[in-house]
């Protein structure tokens, strides 16, 4: 008996069926049977199913003699299912990698509930994806399993069968089957959720719900079959009639039914011309038949429900048309207000440009206004320490204002305060560029900190790399570089690259990276605290996996199978996964403590301090992590593709900071054999540190502040020789292991600054 029976009905989907079936059979969790049902499809679906059945014994091919529709085809597959749990997958959709592993793990940790609800994401033919907007309802916080009465909000989810795993014993006991006609999911999903004695949720995207450009959804076609919705809700309420213990759900289902009717009634292209009045009449009859005391909707929906209930289709359509006109009017008015505000901002900025530059004001930003981080954050903190006469302000989107320290003024991009600060601040610090409309004035000083040692091709060197440069405006790039007075560099390699990739008259300060100061100043207590805040058990080895962005790919799926890697590492390890900041796809894993997605954590420096080792590919994070003198492993499986699309300044495989894996199997083997922290890896890391970390001694921010903000050209902190540095101790040496906490020779330690962040260089 397999753990899962996956049922895939197929009809006229030959272009997508291969991907669908492969997504099932290539799952890391292999204890399954795949029941593929050919619903008498006129294309090659039947032959494709037979091909898969011939090559994989887990596939059952079912061929129906006539086309019976989606619901009946699912019934045919259900009759042959033998797994503990039944899962449905539409033949143009697909499971994401590791989905079944995550589902199996969640079922095990929640005691095998009757129904497990998991998430999905819509995937568009353009390559875009969007997660279910009600994803917050799938939180795994709180007791599990639970009954629907404890989480009634689950009824707001899309009522489909393919985002749930059903215990087969439960399905057979309740006698659930699919009826004929459109909307066949409705009389299955509502009864299943209501009847289940135990439910659980999995807060993870497991299904990619394909949104085809044309012909992908029969529910979006014009047909009288949309009238099947009335029969389907008859079946839902007939089920309730047989279960008096569920009668208290009738008002909820009535409201859901009325909402469904109103949505369908106003959807364009669904109901045939001339049939809308008939639809309203039948909707009115259903509303009168099933209305129950307590079924009054919220104030916002009362008029809509009343019109559906009374059959006033002309009034309904008139009000709906009026609402659309009001929305358009509001949109036009909004554009007008925005235009007036833009004019006011331009006038305001021009006025501010005529006022004196303020020598006591410094403005900072990082990563396109994403919040308080990176080199600008370390410099800003040091300015407040060494130059308290200078007031500091930070430009960040409002969602990131909580990351900015209390003593620093917060500025919202595009606000009047933002443009005033750009016009009048003497010092401006960023790791990218400020708004291109910013006018650099005489007396203003800009510091470009950059945000990593360059391995990948940068600046004007991208002119011959159209896949990576895309629509980059190189003229604007050079205009921005001409505004720089100083550019920071962590090593001689970076200095040479910056001068070539961003040719300008700026001065390069080869001082080290301020954001890396914390690695020399953190103590064992800080490491232990950070690990505890991330939920890393004291006896586990934490591996930080942080891949870089792929310019040659539209979707940023992880190059490594997260679930497989976590499973191969074994129970002694915890995998911390961090997606690149350009990616909207989190690197999630199984619902267990062995994978922790830290993509949203505000401080990558804190994550590095908490990790025992780093796994990456071509990310500049390797140069920073080397400062800690902890193991680094590179996974370079797509080196040729990355090199062809983006280009690199050197072959990192020839001078790596540690072991190099060219395949996923090699990556697993490096950890299985212990080579990740072997003597050869240690020698490679030492050579790498000597070349790329010569100035990262904990005083980079102080050098910058004294040179730029205090005007001191002499007497800057002397670089501490590598052999005299004391980077933060590895977690194995934390207080939990009995080791004594380490302190920096200078007698300075990091302090807490916001949730989970370490901010360096505060004197004690």
Image (cartoon, rainbow, N blue to C red):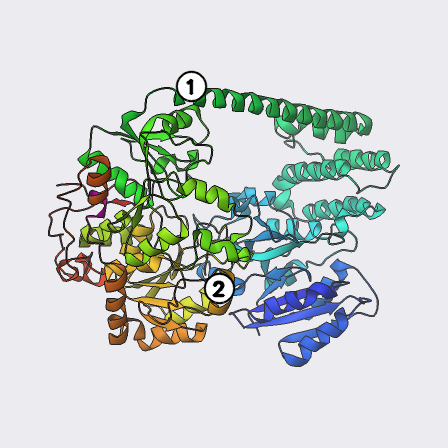
Q: Quadrant of residue 73?
A: bottom right
Q: Is residue 701 magenta?
A: yes
Q: Nearer the viewer, mark 2 or mark 1?
A: 1
Q: Nearer the viewer, residue 688 or 603?
A: 688
537 lies left or right of 386: right
* Magenta stretch bounds: 697-702
* Quadrant placement of the N terminus: bottom right
**Residue 351, which numbered label?**
1
* Mark linked to residue 642: 2
358 inside magenta stretch: no
Horizontal and vertical percent position of residue 647: 46, 62
Which residue sits at x=43%, y=35%? 397
Q: Is residue 756 visible?
A: no
Q: Which quadrant is the C terminus positioned in? A: top left
Which residue: 71% across, 30% down? 305
Image coordinates of residue 697 in percent, x first then y, are 19, 53
* Mark 1: secondary structure: helix
Vertical order, 579 against 350 (above or below): below
Q: Position of residue 425 (x, y in %)?
A: 33, 28
């Amino acid at each position: 008996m397999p753990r899962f029976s996956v049922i895939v009905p197929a009809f006229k989907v030959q272009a997508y069926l291969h991907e669908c079936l492969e997504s099932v059979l290539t799952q890391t969790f292999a204890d399954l049977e795949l029941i593929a049902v050919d619903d008498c499809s006129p294309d090659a679906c039947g032959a494709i199913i037979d091909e898969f059945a011939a090559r994989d014994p887990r596939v059952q091919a079912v061929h129906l003699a006539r086309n019976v529709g989606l619901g009946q085809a699912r019934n045919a597959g259900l009759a042959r299912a033998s797994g503990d749990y039944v899962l449905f997958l539409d033949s143009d959709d697909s499971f994401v990698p590791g989905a079944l592993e995550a589902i199996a793990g969640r079922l095990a940790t929640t005691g095998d509930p009757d129904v497990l609800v998991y998430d999905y994401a819509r995937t568009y033919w353009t390559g875009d994806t969007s997660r279910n907007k009600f994803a917050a309802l799938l939180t795994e916080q709180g007791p599990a399993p639970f009954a629907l009465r404890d989480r009634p909000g689950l009824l707001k989810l899309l009522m489909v069968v393919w985002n749930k795993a059903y215990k087969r014993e439960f399905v057979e006991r309740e006698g659930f089957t699919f009826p004929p006609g459109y909307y066949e999911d409705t009389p299955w999903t509502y009864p299943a959720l209501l009847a289940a004695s135990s439910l659980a949720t999995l807060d993870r995207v497991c299904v990619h719900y394909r949104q085809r450009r044309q012909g992908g959804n029969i529910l979006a076609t014009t047909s009288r079959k949309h009238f099947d919705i009335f029969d389907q809700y008859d079946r839902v309420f007939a089920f309730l009639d047989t279960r008096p213990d569920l009668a208290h759900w009738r008002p909820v289902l009535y409201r859901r039914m009325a909402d469904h009717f109103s949505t369908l009634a106003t959807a364009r292209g669904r109901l045939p011309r001339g049939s809308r009045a008939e639809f309203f009449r039948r909707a009115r009859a259903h509303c009168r038949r099933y209305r129950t005391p307590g079924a009054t909707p919220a104030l916002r929906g009362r008029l809509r429900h009343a019109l559906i209930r009374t059959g006033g289709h002309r009034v309904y359509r008139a009000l709906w048309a009026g609402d659309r006109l009001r929305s358009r009017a509001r949109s036009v008015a909004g554009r007008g207000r925005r235009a007036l505000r833009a004019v006011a901002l331009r006038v305001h900025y021009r006025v501010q440009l005529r006022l004196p530059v303020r020598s006591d004001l410094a403005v900072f930003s990082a990563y396109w206004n994403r919040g308080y981080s990176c080199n600008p954050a370390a410099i800003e903190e040091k300015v407040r320490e060494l130059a308290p006469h200078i007031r500091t302000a930070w430009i960040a989107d409002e969602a990131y204002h909580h990351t900015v320290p209390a003593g620093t003024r917060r500025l919202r991009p595009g606000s009047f305060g933002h443009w005033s600060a750009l016009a009048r601040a003497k010092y401006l610090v960023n790791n990218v560029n400020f708004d291109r409309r910013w006018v650099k004035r005489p007396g203003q000083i800009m510091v470009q900190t950059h945000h990593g040692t360059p391995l990948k091709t940068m600046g004007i060197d991208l002119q011959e790399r159209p896949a990576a440069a895309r629509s980059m405006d190189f003229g604007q790039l050079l205009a921005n570089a001409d505004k720089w007075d100083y550019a920071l560099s962590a090593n001689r390699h970076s200095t040479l690259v910056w001068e070539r990739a961003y040719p300008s008259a700026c001065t390069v300060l080869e001082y080290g990276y301020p954001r890396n100061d914390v690695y020399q100043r953190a103590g064992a207590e800080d490491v232990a605290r950070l690990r505890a805040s991330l939920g890393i058990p004291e006896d586990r080895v934490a591996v930080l996996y942080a891949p870089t962005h792929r310019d040659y790919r539209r979707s940023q799926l992880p190059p490594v199978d997260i679930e497989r890697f976590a499973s191969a590492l074994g129970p002694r390890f915890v995998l911390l996964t961090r997606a690149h900041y350009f990616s909207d796809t989190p690197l999630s894993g199984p619902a267990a403590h062995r994978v922790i997605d830290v993509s949203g954590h505000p401080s990558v420096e804190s994550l590095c301090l908490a990790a025992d080792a780093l796994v990456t590919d071509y990310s500049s994070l390797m140069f920073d992590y080397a400062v800690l003198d902890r193991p680094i492993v590179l996974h370079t499986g797509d080196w040729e593709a990355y090199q062809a699309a983006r280009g690199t300044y050197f072959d990192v495989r020839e001078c790596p900071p540690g072991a190099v894996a060219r395949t996923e199997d090699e990556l697993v083997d490096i950890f299985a054999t212990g080579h990740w922290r072997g003597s050869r890896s240690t020698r490679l890391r030492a050579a790498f540190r000597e070349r790329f970390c010569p100035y990262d001694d904990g005083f980079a921010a102080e050098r910058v502040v004294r040179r730029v903000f205090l005007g001191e050209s002499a007497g800057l902190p002397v670089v501490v020789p590598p052999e005299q540095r004391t980077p933060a101790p590895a977690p194995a040496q934390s207080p939990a292991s009995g080791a004594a906490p380490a302190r920096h020779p200078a007698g300075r330690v990091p302090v807490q600054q916001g949730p989970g962040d370490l901010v360096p260089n505060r004197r004690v």
